[in-house]
Amino acid sequence: MNSIPMTRREFLALSALSGAAVLTGCAINPVTGKKELMFISEADEIRMDSQASPHQFSADYGPLRDSALNAYLEQVGRGLADRSHRPNMPYSFRAVNASHVNAYAFLGGSIATTRGIMLSMDDEAELSALLGHEIGHVNARHAARSMTSSMLVQIGVAAATVAVAEKNEDWAPVVAGLGGIGAGMLLARYSRGHEREADALGMEYMVRSGYNPKGMIGLQDILRKLSHGKPSAIELMFATHPMSEERYQTATKRAATEYAQAADLPVYRERYMDQTARLRKLQGTVDLIQKGDKAVGAKKLDEALGQYRAALQQTPDDYEALLKAAKVCLAMNRTADAQAYAAQAKAVYPEEAQAYHVEAMAATQNRRFDTALADLQHYQRVLPGNPNTLFYTGFVLENMGRKNDAAQQYKTYLQSVNQGGEAQHAANRLTEWGKW
């Protein structure tokens, strides 16, 4: 076995491109029409998207179980995408259960908004600005261009599970979802130049679609106000989408000059309020979850658990609150409580994968290996491609005395990950058992 250690950035680069047909050459930029160096084909973008985006949606606690709201997002997003520079990409739009403020796009056009940002906006024009901005990233091929220039974009599922919470491993269970995919680990990080271009494209697409360009001004104003009023709730968005006062001022100037003729276009406030009415009933619950997240960041787990429990008093079946309570309980070594919360989350949202992973971790700590194995196997069927699931399945099988089965899981795991404590454990066991 090659045990030469790899840096996390090296692993990100390699795993992002493993199995891809990477061709050195030039491609026409869909937005500028100019030739540019591009290693990533459109087919690669779509393939990478299909591999990575389901894991990110699960990390954000799955799509909202509000079919009408998701259909509304799809309608608004599709109207913008049809007027973009790449209308034939396989776009899809959904809201996810995460309470932090964020929106993101994967290379092939899979786009998500969190319920946190949906609750922060006031009208459909602001929503069109948000979705148009994300469509702009897809159209300008920002993630693919970043991968071509640096090969360091975080886009592989395996890469996202390496060195999770590496700055403070004691808090990994809360930060990273107990061996699952940590929030934001799969998202591309954009430059300020990328953000400026996506803003410009977003405003172009929204005006083409009949929206007032003031929606972009309103969106930028919301983000800058949240950065001062709720910095912890918007931290991830600013990590992936650099914000600045310049972006707000630029939107204001562009609306007054380049798009002055669109000043009387509608913002569709009433329609947005109607479509988000059910979601807005959860505002108190989301606020409490955001407070719990802030407490986690401050390493105040008792306080965090109190906030998540308060959220559950308001909304007993809130999937995100249940799983966050489970993770905090695990971090506090309250494994029985953790398993109970995770089991309840499974019952609330049985088709979503994350609860199975969290319950498996709690069941493993409680030495209920049969339950843990069933959960991990279910997770792998529903959401394959997470190397950590392979490791924990091997670990559970090892504790059940099934060495041959455990060895197979460890071998498969080590094909993706060859550094860190889990990799060392797997390698040690294979050596001890003579299974190399």
Image (tube, rainbow, N blue to C red):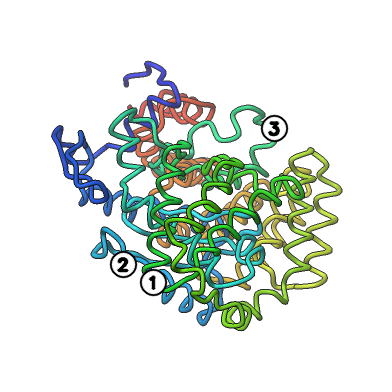
- The answer to the question of whether label 3 and label 2 lie on touching residues, with beta carbons closer than 8 A, is no
* Kind of residue sitting beneath label 3: Asp
Precedes in sequence: disc 3 or disc 2: 2
**100 lies left or right of 158:** right
Precedes in sequence: disc 3 or disc 1: 3
* Kind of residue sitting beneath label 2: Arg
Q: Quadrant of the N terminus?
A: top left
- Please provide percent x and percent y for residue 286: 72, 63
Q: Residue furthest top?
A: 4
Q: Residues within 10 Å of mark 2 (few under 14, many from 20)?
A: some
Q: Residue at the spot x=54%, y=45% of the render? A: 247
Rounded to the nearest angstrom, the CA distance separating label 2 from label 1 is: 7 Å
- The answer to the question of whether label 2 and label 1 lie on touching residues, with beta carbons closer than 8 A, is yes
- Image quadrant assignment for residue 7: top left
User: Camera-side residue: 356 or 377?
Assistant: 356
- Residue 275, compared with residue 53, is above or below; it is below
Q: Residue at the spot x=53%, y=45% of the render? A: 184
Rounded to the nearest angstrom, the CA distance separating label 3 from label 1 is: 49 Å
Task: Check disc 1 and report the residue beneath it.
Answer: 209
* Kind of residue sitting beneath label 1: Ser
Rounded to the nearest angstrom, the CA distance separating label 3 from label 2 is: 48 Å
Task: Check disc 3 and report the residue beneath it.
Answer: 170
Q: Residues within 10 Å of mark 1 (few under 14, many from 20)?
A: some
- Please provide percent x and percent y for residue 308: 78, 59
Task: Check disc 2 and report the residue beneath it.
Answer: 83
SS at badge 3:
helix
